[in-house]
Every structure is written in C-alpha cells, then in structure tokens.
Image (tube, rainbow, N blue to C red):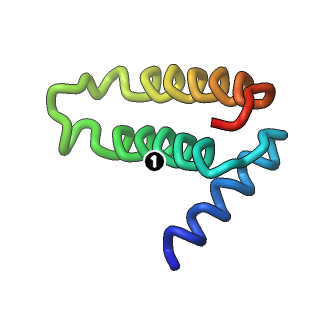
Amino acid sequence: MFRKKQLCLFGAILESFGIKADTAKINLFTNLSLTAMVIRRAIPDTLPFFVPEAAEETMDFQLNAMVDALEKLKTAPAL
C-alpha cells in the first residue's frame, strides 16, 4: 500500500512539472529526491566525512542537477 501511494505522490509531482510519469521515471525521481533528503539530514551527524559547512551548497547543486535532469525527461521517450 505504501509503494502504491508513493508512486502516486511522486508521479503527481512529475506530472505537475509536465513530465509524463511512467514507472521508470517515477522510480528515478523518487530515488533522487529521497537521496537528497537523506544526505542533507545526515550531514554532519551520520556522515562525518562530509563537510557540514558546504551542506547547503551541496544541496543546491544536487537540486539544480535534478531540475536539469527533469527538463530532459520532459521530451525523453519512456524508459
């Protein structure tokens, strides 16, 4: 049940950005989003080798990379 709701949520987010949300794209977007969230929350407590002073800049970079990738998915064929 959780996975079904997760697919619906992340699929709806993709659709709101004009991206045709097939399962492969939803799975990729889900993992990219959750990875960014986990890493941000884990710096510095759980990931001590990361540089806490650069956490915000790191997230900005990752989010910009995700936005660029999502732009490409708008015109990409189904995975």
Q: Position of residue 22 (x, y in %)?
A: 68, 48
Residue shown at the point (67%, 64%) measured from the top left: 8
* Residue 26 vertical placement versus 6 (above, below): above
At label 1, counting other C-alpha atoms closer than 10 Å, the crowd grade (few under 14, some 14-19, many 20 or more) is few
Quarter of the C terminus within the rendering: top right
Q: Image quadrant of residue 64? A: top right
Residue 31 vs residue 67: left or right?
Answer: left
Q: Residue at x 63, y 24 (%)?
A: 69
Q: Is residue 62 above or below residue 15?
A: above
Q: Is residue 50 left or right of residue 28?
A: left
Q: Which residue is mark 1?
A: 34
Outermost residue to the left: 48
Total count of labels: 1
Look at 46% across and 21% down and name the residue there.
57
Q: Residue at x 53, y 41 (%)?
A: 28
Q: What percent of the width, then of the height, locates residue 11?
A: 69, 54
Type of the residue with mark 1: Leu
In front here: 29 or 25?
A: 25
Please provide percent x and percent y for residue 39: 34, 39
Q: Quadrant of residue 67?
A: top right
Q: Nearer the viewer, residue 50 or 13?
A: 13
Residue pushed farthest bottom?
1
Give 37 or 2, whichever is nearer the viewer: 2
**In the rendering, at what x and y percent does residue 70 appear?**
68, 30
Q: Secondary structure at mark 1?
A: helix
Relative to 62, residue 41 above or below: below
Q: Quadrant of residue 76?
A: top right
* Nearer-the-camera pick, 53 or 79: 79
| Above or below for 66 versus 8 | above
